[in-house]
Image (spheres, rainbow, N blue to C red):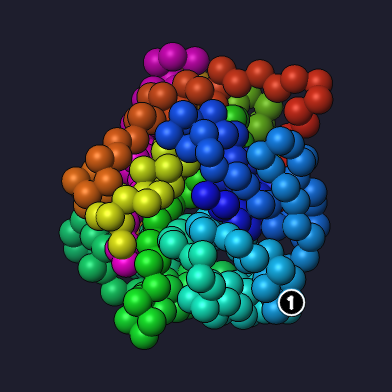
Amino acid sequence: MLILVTGATGKVGRHFITALLDDPRFRMARIRALCHNRLCAEAERVEVARGSIADREAVVQALEGVTHVVHLATCKELPDQVMDVTVKGLFWLLEHFRASVTARQFILIGGDAGIGHFYYRHEGPITEAAAHRAYPGCYALSKVLEEVIIEQYGIQYGVNGCCLRAPWIMEKDDFKYSLSFGDDVFGGPVWKNLVSEADAKRYAEDGTVPLLRDADGRPLKRNFVHVEDLVSAILAAIDNPRAVRQLFNISMDRPVDYGEVAVHLARTRGLRSVDIPSRFHSNWMDNSKAKYLLGWQPRYDLEKLIDSAWQYERAADDPRIVWYPG
């Protein structure tokens, strides 16, 4: 088993490679990490290939002898790059994967941006049958196109593809900083822009957290997944006959409720909260299909997500680096 991992140096890629190498089920597996801007460290079972997935020749060379692809590379709100990296890159990967005599399975990590997450109202739990609805911007559009492309390669050529659709992926102290009123905020909304400058400064200093409310005035519910749970889902999908040409929602059992976050942080850490109105909509991803077909179960619930983020202590050689906004 030779697994090509794109986006190998990113949040999910690093965790996936470590977990796979430590898993006795995959003791014979080898990793080929396709790296572009940052390099992955080579090891006994890890080799590095250089190049961009937008480069056809780089893809051809990277796929030589590969049995599995775990496609993690993506592009955020960068209009000059997103079509080359996300769309053309996936096209070249699938074009040469389908022609390869060694190819067995292609796993794509998708995103809930493709169904609009909290930008649109969903009248019930969001299942894998939900229609694609990209919100404004090129990133959400690219997530729609990814899912459509891999589905069509299954229809056109019988490619054994699987898409794991993930919401916002957390690790370490990400969730803590996703609630910061300071310049160190991770992702969006950018809370400091929603209050006065003086209030933002005060909230950042005393650790006040936002209690985001949805368009109906209720505490907003938004989906998250911890990187460890996403990685366990990838491992569960590898060579799983029940994953063939399937789409799975990979999320926490319940969405994060900003009201429950505020209550938990007030009770456990004495932190205050402040109401932030919004026009966003609460939503709830249904992960029952992945639990039923893959035998997968997320380990992180609301309390574990919060407590692990606040308890995380960074080592001197582990600076907080945000490679992209969210």
Residue 269's place in the image compared with 305, above or below, is above
Residue 90 painted magenta: no
Question: Which residue, given by chain and number where applicable, does mark 1 sit on?
Answer: 57
Looking at this view, is 23 or 278 the one in front? 23
Looking at this view, is 75 or 46 the one in front? 46
Which residue does the image show at 36% across and 29% down from the upper left?
Answer: 299
Q: Is residue 128 left or right of residue 39?
A: left
Q: Residue 10: x, y in percent?
A: 66, 48
Q: Residue 166: x, y in percent?
A: 42, 53
Q: Is residue 184 left or right of residue 268?
A: right
Which residue does the image show at 52% across and 78% down from the upper left?
Answer: 99
Local packing at callout 1 (Cα closer than 10 Å; few below 14, some 14-19, many 20+) is: few
Looking at this view, is 217 or 169 the one in front? 169
Which range is magenta? 245-269
The amino acid pointed to by label 1 is: Glu
Residue 219's place in the image compared with 306, above or below, is below
Q: Secondary structure at mark 1?
A: helix
Q: Residue 304: x, y in percent?
A: 41, 24
Q: Residue 274: x, y in percent?
A: 48, 36
Residue 248 painted magenta: yes
Looking at this view, is 302 or 3 the one in front? 3
